[in-house]
Image (cartoon, grey):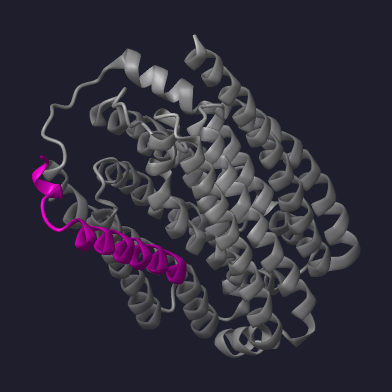
Amino acid sequence: MNRLLLGNTNNLERKIYFWNIVGSMANALASVILLFVVTRISGANDAGIFTLANSTALMMLTIGFYEMRAFQATDVAGVYSFSDYLMSRFVTVAAMVIASIFFVFLGGYTNEKAAVMLLLCIYKVFDALEDVFHGLYQQQGRLDVAGRSLSLRVLLSTATFVVVLLVTRSLVGSCIAAIIAAAIGFMLFNLTIFRNFYDGRFHWNKKAIFKLLWVCLPMFLGSFMLIYINNAPKYAIDTYMQGDYFQAYFGYLFMPPFVINLFSTFIFRPMVTPMAEAWAKNDRGRLVHIIRKLLIAIVFLVIAGEIVGYFLGIPVLSWFYGVDLSAYRAELLILVLGGGCNAIVTLMFYGITVLRKQKLLVVGYGATLVLALIISNIFVQSSGLMGASLAYLISMVVLALLFFVIFIICYKKEARKMDIAGAQ
């Protein structure tokens, strides 16, 4: 038995959920804290620059992730080695850096905005590198190790950013310091421990790497399009609304749905491998039970978010960021609902991936991307931040419905195939 899995199973399960929650919370709160600090120290205009730069960095991060984590975590048969996953990640991270450079310098941004964007993209490189190690831990049932290393690295880099910004009042200098801290944290909290989980050799298996990148291509394209769908209202705001502070206001209002999505991650992530195992063993009842449970959790999360948002959301956000957001209660509630739909999108994404029908993800993402690009520009031009909020909600509702339909159709089709094979 793996020495890492020895001990009381219940204690291990508690550790897994505890550290997964801590890691997800640290990751979620980091963006909230950084935006708060930038707003309080540098003002709403710099906060607007940071908001757009962070959104762009998250979009570029999808290239680094290549959405391979879901495939890695559900590779219960061990078709690919950790060496294959790591070498593939080096390729995607290199592509991420190149794409970031082209995107930023072809965007026509001011020097400061371009510098902050590019630096935050580089900062996210360590998220991409760390993720493949966390996939290894998850494969071996030790998501607690991933949560612990994530929380420690995020804490170190966030604290460094805050301290340097307080001392220098320089957004660019703070981003550089955060990059250095992230690099140190990555080495301390991952490179020193991963050999406890993988003692194999590393080699460049060109055939396996190419096949892995090809298999995950639909998931990557879908994930990239999803981030662009999320960012479409922000780019429309940057184009049609004068003043970076509008971008900051939308960023403040977007924090609750952003946190909902990240918190839903700690609910979903521990269940991805069990979902894959259930499907591999033809235990369809268990798979459906897990998905139904997670859907119910999302519904309760959204209801709680709407209630808290209605009564406390605007006062708390206004106090926290030091701006008057009292005119934007309706926008906040719309965005929270959109965040709930985004959580459903993520769940259905995992479900479709477990069925190994990831090619169909591109269909849903592609259709929704076209819709988002059209309505974001039209709605923001006509209704400002309300239009941006409605564009986000409509895009998420459409995508959630498309994915739900795709999952149901694929599930029924594959179930029939299993029944026929079993009968023979």
Q: Where is residue 171 in the image (x, y as percent from the top left)?
A: 46, 70
- Residue at the (62%, 45%) spot, across then down: 226
Figure disc tally: 0
Let me know if residue 421 is in the magenta part.
Answer: no
When asked about the image quadrant of residue 361, the answer is: top right
When asked about the image quadrant of residue 366, the answer is: top right
Front residue of 200 and 346: 346
Quarter of the image with the N terminus is: top left
In this view, which residue lies farthest toward the right? 382
Q: Is residue 398 above or below residue 66?
A: below
- Residue at the (35%, 29%) spot, across then down: 88
In this view, which residue lies farthest toward the top? 424
- Residue at the (71%, 45%) spot, across then down: 399
Q: Position of residue 67 (x, y in %)?
A: 47, 38
Q: Position of residue 350 (x, y in %)?
A: 51, 41
In this view, which residue lies farthest toward the front? 423
Which range of residues does the magenta coloring cover?
1-30
Q: Where is residue 384 in the image (x, y as percent from the top left)?
A: 83, 67
Front residue of 423 and 14: 423
The answer to whether residue 101 is seen in the rendering is no
Q: In the picture provided, is 406 more to the left or to the right than 343? A: right
Q: In the picture provided, is 59 more to the left or to the right than 71? A: right
Magenta stretch prevailing secondary structure: helix
Let me know if residue 2 is in the magenta part.
Answer: yes
The answer to whether residue 292 is seen in the rendering is yes
Q: Is residue 375 above or below residue 370?
A: below
- Residue at the (29%, 64%) spot, across then down: 19
